[in-house]
Image (cartoon, rainbow, N blue to C red):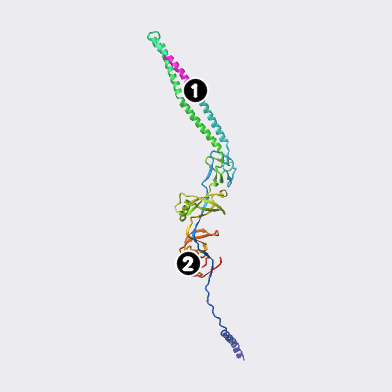
Amino acid sequence: MSRVRTVLRWLLPVVILGVAAAVTALLISTRPEVPAEPAQEQAWPVTTVDVEIAAHRPVLRLQGFLESPATATLTAAVNADVTAVPIREGDTAAAGDALVRLDDEEQRLALEERDADVAELRSQRSVEEQRVAMDRQELAWEEDLLALFDREVERLEDLSRDQFASPSDLERAQQERTRQRLAVAQRRFAVDTAGQRLEQLDARLERARTLRDRAALDLARTDLRAPFDARVAEVLVAPGDRVAPGEALLQLYDVSALEIRATVPRHALGPLRLAAAGTGVDASAEVDGQRVPVALSRFSGRADPGQGGVDALFDVTARGDELVLGRFASLEVLLPPEPDSILLPFEALYDAGRVYRVEADRMQAVDVQRIGQARLPNGERGVLVRASGLSSGDRVVATQIPQAMDGVRVQVMEQ
């Protein structure tokens, strides 16, 4: 009895599995037939732009920094103490505004001393002129006296020959005449050199006047003022400092002479020079988020070895008082029009040198020559190309899709 139960325990699962398999086979064999659908090719949704072959003006983007050729460092001209600095770094000053004041007591005393020297020499010259006049008068008197001595000697010589005068009287008269001749010579020398003595006094007087003017200039330099409309870049002293001649006090720059120095790449030098020599260059800059009008002024006269281009200097024509020296600037320069060029959005360019034209809802590759960048009608930047394989009116894919290649099917979406 137990053996029968064991056989039934193992046989029952086998029977159940067999019945299930039979039922499954019956269901599969009796199911309805469904016809297979053919696989459909995927169409990529894209947007397109119409090709327009025309003369477009490339936009050259440059980067540079603000600088000023009118940057001045004011220095002390005298030894003095700083008494006041009425301006601070970053302030603007009009021409003539006070910047730094120095103690002027030493310079005032020096000026008074030089004034006294000039007055003394003027007095000496006046006395010398009177002495010259007196010398001329005394010379006439000395010459008259010499003539009297000459006649006295002649008279005694005649008397001595006739033995009416003693030899001692004659010798005494001759000695007096010699002494008088010496006096006349000395007086005549004084008269003859009067002009030289006056010239020496004039030279000393001129030197004294020059030293006085220099002292007056040093006194004026104790009050430093702005030489032009400027912004203060740096203040280097404070009240109480002792400064020496040549020591820097502050640095400032002319806000009306700001420039932007930017390096122009080699490939754009020719068109930019051509535009500068012709109708001019249209340019604008962006500094600290604000648009600034600029104009091409000149090109740099030198380039560093290995530099990829030449520096161009753009004058800031307005709003210079709102800018700070040394700030970064981004420039956009319009170059002369490129004939037979095509303006496309950047999304239309593949691998930097290929676009895809849409023909019968399929992509067709066209090689293009990249010229530069330009502004699209909506104000955004686009790529400027030239392609012999494109014609006006062609539609070009303006959407980046993966694995783009010839023959890929696309579905043009509404713009």
Q: Residue at x 47, y 19 (%)?
A: 138
* Residue where numbered disc 2 is placed: 365
6 relative to 147 in the view: left or right? right
**Mostly what secondary structure, the magenta segment?**
helix
Please give the residue where the numbered disc 1 appears in the rendered image. 131
* Cα–Cα span, label 2 and label 1: 111 Å
* Above/below status of 115 relative to 24: above
Regarding residue 127, the answer to whether it shows in the image is yes
Say if the magenta span includes residue 181. no
Rate crowding at label 1 as few (under 14), some (14 to 19) or many (20 or more) other CA atoms within 10 Å: some
**Count the marks: how many?**
2
Query: Picture coordinates of residue 244 (x, y %)?
Result: 54, 40
| Along the line of sight, the residue nearer the viewer: 4 or 298 | 298
> Which numbered marker is on residue 263?
none
Question: On screen, 125 above or below 358?
Answer: above
The answer to whether the residue labelled 2 contacts the one labelled 1, judged by CB atoms less than 8 Å apart, is no
Percent coordinates x, y for residue 362 in the rendering: 50, 69
User: Which quadrant is the C terminus positioned in?
Assistant: bottom right
Question: Is 272 situated left or right of 106 in this image?
Answer: left
Q: Does residue 408 sit above or below 117 in this rendering?
A: below
- Nearest the viewer among 48 and 237 is 48
Q: What is the quadrant of the N terminus in the image?
A: bottom right
Q: Bounds of the magenta span?
A: 136-150
Looking at the rendered structure, the secondary structure element under dot 1 is helix
Residue 306 picture quarter: bottom left
- Determine which quarter of the picture holds residue 24: bottom right
Q: Amino acid at mark 2?
A: Ala
The answer to which of 113 and 312 lies nearer the viewer is 312
User: What x and y, as percent, mark residue 240?
Assistant: 59, 41
Taking depth in this image into account, of 160 and 63 the one nearest to the observer is 63
- Asked if the magenta segment contains residue 137, the reply would be yes
- Residue 79 x, y percent position in the rendering: 54, 38
